[in-house]
Image (tube, rainbow, N blue to C red):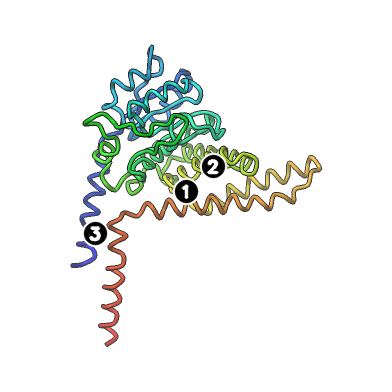
Amino acid sequence: MSPSSTLSPLRGSFLALMSQPALTIASLLKAPPLLLACGRWLKGGRYELVALGEGADPVVELETRRDGFDAVLLEQGALPAEAYQHLIRQGLRLPAVVVGPVSGRLEYHDAEVHLGPDQLEQLPYSLDAAVSRVLRRGGLGSTGPADGEGVVPPSGWTLTNRLKERLGYLGVFYKRDSTRFLRNLPPDQCTDLLQSLERTYRDLLISYFRDPAAANQALESFVHTAFFSDLPTTKAVEIHMNLIDDFWKQLKLEAHSNSFLQDYRLVLLDVMAHLCEMYRRSIPTDAQQLAPRLELQAAVSSQGVAS
């Protein structure tokens, strides 16, 4: 069997996945300007945004319509902790993006993705990341601000199975939308996304040594967007160096010591390590199993030619 014939099922699965309908996102955002801004960045993409936050009880609405949603968009601090506890007691843990200050605080559960309100250009990529984290884990863990250990989802409703049906077993990692790669964006959108990534990286640098929890959320946000936008590693290094240079100039202007900035090389190493891990996980299991066989076939062929 030739390598091309072996890979054809993977290609077929990939093309089938790309034709899947948009995922439906429940918005529990309370602030109308924030909802408007989020809608702008999700317009025309693979996601359909349904506003529930302005209703009398958006949590009950979400619970009632649970079969109609694939993920949830939240506003940090807009709902009381009891609301999330209620959802988890009902076995309802959707992939979540939380918009608000990146403070290290957990809002809903331990797989949520956080995004600063000044970084909404990254929202489609953050939603991809939120869904991918659920698929990669095979479901959501029970740790978080509202612990739901022992909760069994209602019969006939399994989130992971639903997402796999919509996205396929390869998951979101392998079906990155190439139209949203940085190099394929219109120039103005490319500029907006890079500036947003710079703001995220700045948050990461500021909190890296003084607030590990907040730094971890900023790190995840940057790496997720870098992966799903196919950000070149050289561009990530450039963002790091430009920000460090800005810090150096500011410290020099204020007559402060800047020798400690060398320690921030650890931030770049951390980012690259996390990004490499995401790429490693993005390789489908079938392709990982196929690689050794292809290497063996190539070795046998080369030996045959040599003999």
Q: Which badge, 1 or 3, is on the more N-terminal residue?
A: 3
10 Å neighbourhood of mark 3: few (<14), some, or many (≥20)?
A: few
Q: Which badge, 2 or 1, is on the more N-terminal residue?
A: 2
Left or right: 173 in relation to 199: left
Instruction: Quarter of the image for the C terminus: give it.
Output: bottom left
The image shows residue 295 at horizontal and vertical percentages of 31, 70
Closest to the observer: 9 or 229?
9
The image shows residue 66 at horizontal and vertical percentages of 29, 25
**Amino acid on which disc 1 is placed:** Leu
The image shows residue 192 at horizontal and vertical percentages of 51, 37
Q: Residue furthest top?
A: 56
10 Å neighbourhood of mark 1: few (<14), some, or many (≥20)?
A: some
Q: Which residue is mark 2?
A: 216
Q: Which residue is mark 1?
A: 231
In whole angstroms, how far apart are the C-alphas of marks 2 and 1? Answer: 19 Å
10 Å neighbourhood of mark 2: few (<14), some, or many (≥20)?
A: some
Closest to the observer: 232 or 67?
67
Q: Which residue is mark 3?
A: 7
Q: What residue is rendered at 24% in x and 65% in y?
A: 3
Nearer to us of marks 2 and 3 is 2
Please say if 272 is above or below 4: above
Left or right: 244 in relation to 200: right
The image shows residue 229 at horizontal and vertical percentages of 43, 45
Q: Residue furthest left?
A: 1
Q: Which of the 4 image quarters holds residue 153?
A: top left
Residue 267: mark: none
**Amino acid on which disc 2 is placed:** Asn
Q: Are marks 2 and 1 in contact (CB under 8 Å)?
A: no
Q: Residue furthest bottom?
A: 307
Q: What residue is rendered at 73% in x and 44% in y?
A: 249
